[in-house]
Image: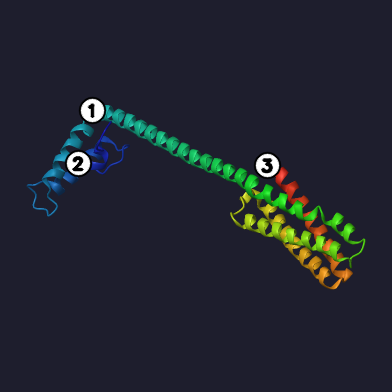
Amino acid sequence: MVKSNHYKTLEVSQQATQGEIKQAYRRLAKQFHPDSRCETADHDKIVMINAAYEVLGDPQRRRAYDQQLSVGDTYDFSKRRQRRTADAQDIYQHHRQAEKNGEAYQDQWYQQTYSQVIRLINQIIKPLDSQIEALSADPFDDQLMEVFQSYLETCRHYLNQAKLLFSSRPNPPKLAKVAANLYYCLNQVNDGIEELELFTLNYDDHHLHTGKELFRIASRLRSEAQEYAKACVR
């Protein structure tokens, strides 16, 4: 492999004629020769110029030198290609590891956040109809009202647990729609509990009906979250 380039030393192209090489040598020798009175005189430089001309000034040696250059170019190209391949492999491995980490975090969020929040929401929503049916026997019965209020207190407890779980870690980007539906679902559940609590204070059926409607909306949002989750993790 050629370490220096005689063509660059003589300031000519590799396609230069022998006459152009000779002219370039004379010009540079005059410019850098130590015996000249030019300010550019440089002993080391003239040594390089002479060495270059000894090779390029002889057509046979020049052909051999050109072959060495060709081999050197091929070697450099091969090294660059190998380096590009290695860089590409490093980038691929980095992205693949990032994907694996993302998949692992997504599975963890699904199991430890999503599934648990869904379970808590179900424990709030599913008993509502049976609770209201039991209370409807006599809303003014203190014992029946106490049972219903106990149910609402349990709902509030489950809701706080669900909110804490949901906010404990960021959702994976792939499950953003799932998280959005859970967020709105929890808000509807919260508002529904507040309406039902108001009913226990003033017996106004408007609050009871509004609470049931808010729970219905929450149930729909929960179902949509489950559908999105199934599509993402299948």
Q: Nearer the viewer, residue 214 or 41?
A: 214
**Residue at x 74%, y 48% (from the top left corner):** 226
Q: Depth check: 72 or 114 in front? A: 114
What colouring style does the render use?
Answer: rainbow
Q: CA distance from mark 3 to mark 1?
A: 69 Å
Point out residue 80 in the picture as x, y percentages from the top left corner: 39, 36
Image disc number at residue 61: 1
Mark 2 or mark 3, earlier in chain: 2
Amino acid type, callout 1: Arg
At horizontal 67% and vertical 54% (from top left) the residue drawn is 179
The relative height of residue 185 versus residue 100 in the rendered view (above or below) is: below
Q: In x, y percent, where is residue 127?
A: 82, 54
Badge 2: few (under 14), some or many (20 or more) residues near its Cα, within 10 Å? Answer: many
Residue to which mark 2 is pinned:
25
Q: Position of residue 135 (x, y in %)?
A: 88, 61
Name the mark nearer the viewer: 3 or 1.
Answer: 3
The quadrant of the picture occupied by the N terminus is top left
Of tags 1 and 2, the one toward the viewer is 1
Element type where label 1 sits in the image: helix
Q: Which element carries disc 3, helix, strand or loop?
A: helix
Tag shown at residue 233:
3
Image height of 34 relative to 147, above or below? above
